[in-house]
């Protein structure tokens, strides 16, 4: 089991975060860190967008962001979730996703629903999300990506 820690992307770790990369066949699935930071600045979807990095043993292993409407119950979205290509297939994705869900519960007390989208071709991610309890809504966003939701109790 890994000791995954979530931290904001800051002036102290952004350069290390920029070193994250996914496999070539995954690059169209997730934004790179520069794009995630641009989204945080522009906030194209909701009132807030917070970018984070995932650490294990003081080394950045992945990243994600949360986009949301503060104090809403059902407008919390996980985006840009990625594990560095050198660490994929070792269980980091599953444990990191569990940690992200716990993090949202702890820091966004009003949240009752967490949503995300995924590329249809990204079967590995779909299996990961479904194992974590996310359920397809049989709807797509404007980019034709299926929407998945997790109800928080």
Image (cartoon, rainbow, N blue to C red):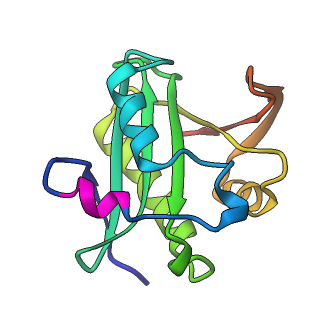
**151 vs 83, nearest the viewer:** 83
Q: Note whether residue 153 is visible.
A: no
Q: Is residue 22 left or right of residue 63?
A: right
- Please give the range of residues in magenta: 13-18
- Residue found 56% across the figure and 73% down from its top: 85
Q: Is residue 120 left or right of residue 2?
A: right
Report x, y in % for residue 107: 29, 39
In reply to whether residue 15 is colored magenta, the answer given is yes
**Quadrant of the image occupied by residue 41:** top left
Magenta segment main secondary structure: helix
**143 vs 126, nearest the viewer:** 143
Number of numbered callouts drawn? 0
Q: Residue furthest left?
A: 12
Note whether 141 is above or below 52 in the view shown: above
Q: Quadrant of the N terminus?
A: bottom left
- Residue found 38% across the figure and 20% down from its top: 42
Report x, y in % for residue 73: 47, 21
């Amino acid at each position: 089991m890994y000791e995954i820690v979530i931290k904001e992307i800051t002036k102290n770790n952004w350069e290390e975060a920029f070193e994250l990369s996914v496999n070539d066949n995954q690059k169209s699935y997730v934004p790179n860190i520069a794009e995630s930071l641009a989204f945080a600045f522009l906030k194209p979807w909701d009132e807030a967008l917070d970018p984070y990095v995932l650490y294990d043993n003081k080394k950045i292993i992945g990243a994600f962001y949360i986009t949301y409407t503060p104090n809403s119950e059902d407008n919390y979205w996980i985006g840009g979730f990625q594990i560095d290509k050198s660490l994929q297939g070792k269980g980091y994705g599953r444990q990191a996703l569990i940690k992200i869900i716990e993090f949202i519960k702890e820091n966004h007390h009003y949240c009752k629903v967490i949503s995300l989208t995924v590329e249809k071709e990204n079967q590995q991610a779909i299996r990961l999300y479904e194992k974590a309890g996310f359920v397809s809504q049989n709807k797509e966003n404007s980019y034709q990506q299926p929407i998945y939701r997790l109800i928080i109790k």
